Amino acid sequence: MKNKVLFLTLLMLLFGCSRNSKLDPLKKAEDEHQKGNIKRAIEIYTEFVRANPQNPRAPEVLFKLAQIYLNELKMPTKSTEFFNKIVEDYPKSKEAMKALFMIGFIYANELNDYEKAKIYYQKFLDLYPNSELAVSAKFELENLGRKPEELVK
């Protein structure tokens, strides 16, 4: 009887762990990111999206990758690639709206490509005219190329 209880307990532990295995890569990536192991976090996030493109969390993971490239690695062009992937592959996701705005923002404020910024901000306004970011998109469009000190005057 004692062996049966031990066997059942081990079986429950094994099945309990395997049920959570789909979330483990994201937890591991987040842990690596928190520890400052950015390269490893990127590898795990990228592999997750590659292996699970239909997972509802894929757009969220792509957004994290875009943020890492933009804010931590200072690679805005690479960041726009991830934001574009969200917009193109997951247009109905909650991240698509923010990603489209961020593409315009990056072109305007990081890459100084005002023509592309204008295109993306206008696309944003066409698709999301009532979003909370619409006011910011309009402001950005009206002030493309102007320096912050010029806006204060």
Image (cartoon, rainbow, N blue to C red):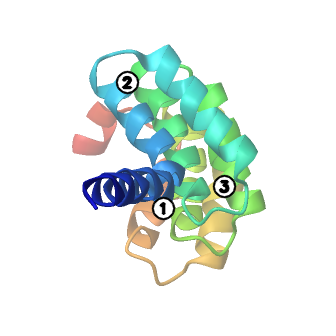
- Closest to the camera, between mark 1 and mark 3, is 3
Residue 80 visible? The answer is no
Q: Residue at x 77, y 59 (%)?
A: 88
Numbered disc in front, either 2 or 1: 2
Nearest the camera: 34 or 126? 34
Q: CA distance from mark 1 to mark 3?
A: 19 Å
Label 1: which secondary element: helix
Looking at this view, name the residue that lies furthest to the bottom.
130
Q: Which residue is mark 2?
A: 32
**Does residue 146 appear anywhere in the picture?**
yes
Residue 46 lies, in percent from the top left, at: 64, 34
- Could you tell me which quadrant the N terminus lies in? bottom left
Tell me the crowding category of disc 3: few under 14, some 14 to 19, or many 20 or more residues within 10 angstroms, Cα based: many
- Verify CB contact (< 8 Å) between mark 3 and mark 2: no
The residue drawn where x is 32% and y is 52% is 3
Q: Amino acid at mark 2?
A: Glu
Residue type for callout 3: Ile
State which quarter of the image contains the C terminus: top left
For the residues labelled 2 and 1, the Cα–Cα distance comes to 34 Å
Label 2 secondary element: helix
Q: Would you name the residue on which mark 3 appears?
A: 86
Q: Position of residue 31 (x, y in %)?
A: 32, 30
The residue labelled by disc 1 is: 137
Local secondary structure at mark 3: helix
Task: Looking at the image, tell me whether mark 2 or mark 1 is earlier in sequence order.
Answer: 2
Q: Nearer the viewer, residue 113 or 1?
A: 1
> How busy is the neighbourhood of tag 2: few (under 14 within 10 Å), some, or many (20 plus)?
some
